Image (tube, rainbow, N blue to C red):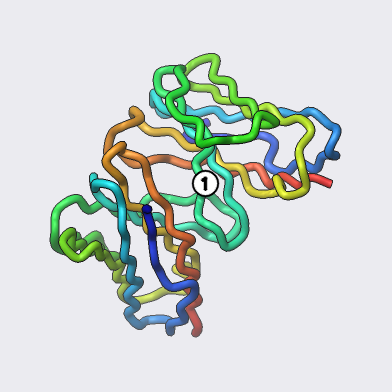
Amino acid sequence: ETGVTQTPRHLVMGMTNKKSLKCEQHLGHNAMYWYKQSAKKPLELMFVYNFKEQTENNSVPSRFSPECPNSSHLFLHLHTLQPEDSALYLCASSIIAGGSGEQFFGPGTRLTVL
Amino acid sequence: GQNIDQPTEMTATEGAIVQINCTYQTSGFNGLFWYQQHAGEAPTFLSYNVLDGLEEKGRFSSFLSRSKGYSYLLLKELQMKDSASYLCAPMDSNYQLIWGAGTKLIIKP
């Protein structure tokens, strides 16, 4: 596979469920990002990892828990979500964080919280 | 604060030219990106400007004026497949992208 992949593509969960989103990049990049995209709103940066270390947490509620075991994989663990958390969750990667290189995005996970 | 302003929606005709404007206010500046996003798909990179002037890349061109906090994306010879949202994203002093809400471009035959 090439580029940035995300699984699952669609997820429906109840407010008491626990689920995880997975992202994998095959570009040899060292930075990975989680974004939230809600309808007609700007992309919201959630977390940034650079060389496996978290460098950014944009005041994200603790019900979202990221994990970056290596530079190629990124997870977002979800628990006790709220209906307003329903959105498209996008993963992206770049050569490094804190540089001017472009970010490459995965196709996203469409999350619906009931 | 940091702010991006671009039109919510634009309509153009196949074969024509359209210009999508973006004005921005950021804490510092390290260049500006334009991304294209088709409905239900990932954003894809179109252009990056860090110096003033026009960058041409095939049918697409991007312009930047740092003193005015202004950029535009110019699309020529419009095709139906250009129907998408176009996202303006300047990079601030911390190299963080500040995203606009995007301009939805509708191409009519």
Q: Is residue B59 visible?
A: no
* Three-letter code for the amino acid on which mark 1 is drawn: Glu
In the image, residue B13 above or below residue A58: below
Query: Which residue is at 36% across, 40% downward?
Result: B96
The location of residue B44, given as percent across then percent down, is 43, 50
Query: Which residue is at 63% across, 29% downward?
Result: A76
- Which corner quadrant of the image does residue A13 belong to? top right
- Which corner quadrant of the image does residue B6 belong to? bottom left
Provide the chain ID for the residue under circle 1.
Answer: A
In the image, residue A26 above or below residue A40: above
Query: Which residue is at 24% across, 48% downward?
Result: B29
A75 or B56, which lies in front?
A: A75
- Which corner quadrant of the image does residue A23 belong to? top right
A80 or A33, which lies in front?
A: A80
The location of residue A100, given as percent across then percent down, is 27, 39
Q: Secondary structure at mark 1?
A: strand
Query: Which residue is at 58% across, 21% downward?
Result: A67
Does A95 sit left or right of A44 as displayed?
Answer: left
**Which residue carries the number 1 mark?**
A44
Does A72 sit left or right of A21 as displayed?
Answer: left
Does B16 sit left or right of A112 as displayed?
Answer: left
